[in-house]
Amino acid sequence: MKLNPETVLKRCPYLRLSLNSSNEVQVSVEGKTVKCGLHALSILELFSEPLTVAAALKQLGARVTAGERVAAIATLFRLYEGGVLRDVSTAARAETTSAADHKLTHTTGDAGAVEASTVDSSDDDAGEDFAAAEIYFACPLDDSARQLIPYRERDAREGEPELTRRDPLKLNSRVALQIGDATPARFAARLPFLDRFSPRRPLLWVEDAGTQALAPYWPNPRQAELFKRLESGESTPAELDEETARRFADAQILLAPGEEEARAKRWQRACEEWRRDLENHQHAVLRKIVHPLQLAALRRYFRALDAHGQLKASSNRHYAHNRRSIYDEETSRFVQQQINALVNRITPAPVRPSHCQVSVYQPGAFLHRHKDQPQYVWNLSLVVDTEPELDLESAWPINLEVEGEKREVRLEIGDAVLYRGSEFTHWRDVLPEDQSVTLLFCFFSPAND
């Protein structure tokens, strides 16, 4: 493999780093580990965004002494040869082309397969290139975001009356439009871990008055322009066409009068109930904690990651059989960060996100009886996806042993259970042969730790 000064590199998004007592940095990616010195940390920081080799060497030269320069350059080459830094020259050149001239691929993962179809992005409903090596998360404000909404949510929506131009809607005050790479100042401190988000802009950030989570939506150019007109007061919700009004209302960009206050009160009551459940039963079952559109987008995204080999088989078959996982994946960490606000309204003492893991359990999978590591004071297991979708009575249960008694907890897609995994033994029995389940495990540590 050869590098030249104009080669554009970027670090691989799925990395695990460890530093031992000898100051050796070990960078693991896709089952391979590259061992190098401390210069690796500076190099990985430089290539967090696409950068030419020439520009990187210039910046690196300013950070190290003359005697360290050769070792630093050697580390850069080692990271490139090990697959930690990837050549994105072609992609970087493509970014200079107008987005309207691109063709993007929209992928919907099905059970065990990924189906790709090409869409011209000059159409308002452009998708994402899931068939490429780079897989991005996106929740567009079009029909593609609705295809994987859980059936229970779709059934509930079918019973709702259609919006009309006479419906009194107002613009949600908790919405911000992002045009470029810089996140809106009012939300910036709450928006880490966006590396795997689609680079397509604009983007709308919506804060849920109930869960206090931030949700991203990708409007098409026409929808973005209509939002700007609403925000500036040039037009009103009543002037929107019915389809746009429905899409904006579904994403909570538009709200009915009193809806924001009612939702905040409803979730406050739920948090109080869950807090009592933790005190009395040592666990709490949290229902529907992820917005249906966001949940649909996550299902599609994790299916694409799995189909492209990003989730790896468990190395300990006695602990977890027939399971594929990915650890601390960026979009998963974003979701955990947003869930953290809700968790802190339930737990007796403040916590912070510590570690997360997405796991796909295949037919015949099981999870052995165990307790988690002591630094994780709270565990949250969120069901992201199941195949097929089942009702609550048929859902695959997690078992908790509390005060010598077995507690069986069943969850539907979008539900979660919060418990102390380091204190209470928990396990899952064998998953039936015709089912698969995708779980997001969120681990939380004390906030002052």
Image (spheres, rainbow, N blue to C red):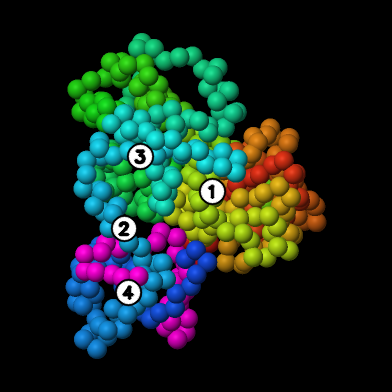
Q: Which residue is mark 3?
A: 104
Q: Secondary structure at mark 2?
A: loop
* Residue 199 appears in the picture as rendered: yes
Question: What is the distance, in whole Å, between disc 3 and disc 1 at their CAs?
Answer: 18 Å
On the rendered structure, is 85 left or right of 154? left
**Could you tell which of marks 1 and 4 lies nearer the N-terminus?**
4
Q: Which residues are drawn in magenta?
A: 1-28
- Quarter holding the N terminus? bottom left
**Could you tell which of marks 3 and 1 lies nearer the N-terminus?**
3
Looking at the image, which residue is at 31% across and 70% down? 2
Question: What is the distance, in whole Å, between disc 2 and disc 1 at their CAs?
Answer: 22 Å
Q: Which mark is residue 76?
A: 4
How packed mark 1 is, by other alpha carbons closer than 10 Å (few <14, some 14-19, many 20 or more), is some
x, y percent for residue 207: 39, 38
**Could you tell which of marks 4 and 2 lies nearer the N-terminus?**
4
Question: What is the distance, in whole Å, between disc 3 and disc 4 at their CAs?
Answer: 32 Å
Looking at the image, which residue is at 64% across and 65% down? 315
Q: Which residue is mark 1?
A: 307
Q: Which residue is mark 2?
A: 88
Is disc 2 in contact with disc 1, using a CB cutoff of under 8 Å?
no
Residue 123 sits inside the magenta stretch:
no
Q: Is residue 370 above or below residue 114?
A: below
